[in-house]
Image (cartoon, grey):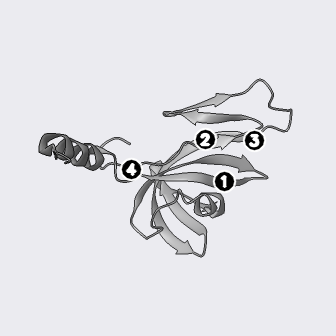
């Protein structure tokens, strides 16, 4: 006869509910490095054509397919390509007005977002 332990079952449910709803796996560029928390950590194996990794805090102003027009601090508008984040399933909803923190890299003058997080109202 099996016994049921209600406290253990409740604890399991509470742990599952405590996990962040939008938790996303860290982005890893096998050749160059990975995001660890909020810091890009470069690998020593990254070659001379290394992509410059960066994060941009902004608000989505327009969406055209996987291209986002964003407004960054000081009303700086730019277009970013969200294709890598969408392919990695780390973009979330790409909607006008969403406050984001886009992590990615610059290549040939264009920013490619590899992860798009929702930014909190205060700070990041």
Residue linked to disc 3: 51
Q: State the CA–CA distance, disc 3 to disc 1.
A: 10 Å
Q: State the CA–CA distance, disc 2 to disc 4.
A: 15 Å
Sequence-wise, the earlier of marks 3 and 1 is 3
Quarter holding the C terminus is top left
Q: Looking at this view, is 1 or 29 the one in front?
A: 1
Q: Secondary structure at mark 2?
A: strand
Q: Residue at x 74, y 53 (%)?
A: 109
Check if mark 2's residue and mark 3's residue have beta carbons within 8 Å: no
Work out whether 35 lies above or below 114: above
Q: Secondary structure at mark 1?
A: strand
Q: Is 11 left, or right, of 33 in this rendering? A: left
Q: Secondary structure at mark 4?
A: loop
Sequence-wise, the earlier of marks 3 and 4 is 3
Residue linked to disc 4: 119
Residue linked to disc 2: 54
Quadrant location of residue 69? bottom right
Q: Residue at x 26, y 44 (%)?
A: 18
């Amino acid at each position: 006869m099996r016994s049921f332990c209600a406290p253990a079952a409740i604890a399991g449910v509470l742990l599952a509910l405590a996990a962040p709803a939008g938790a996303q796996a860290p982005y890893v560029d096998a050749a160059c490095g990975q995001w660890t928390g909020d810091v890009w950590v470069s690998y020593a194996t990254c070659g001379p054509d290394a992509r410059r990794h960066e994060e941009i805090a902004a608000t989505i102003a327009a969406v055209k397919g996987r291209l986002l027009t964003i407004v960054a601090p000081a009303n700086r508008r730019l277009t970013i390509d969200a294709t890598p984040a969408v392919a990695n399933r780390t973009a979330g909803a790409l909607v006008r007005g969403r406050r984001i923190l886009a992590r990615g890299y610059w290549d040939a003058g264009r920013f490619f977002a590899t992860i798009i997080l929702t930014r909190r109202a205060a700070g990041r």
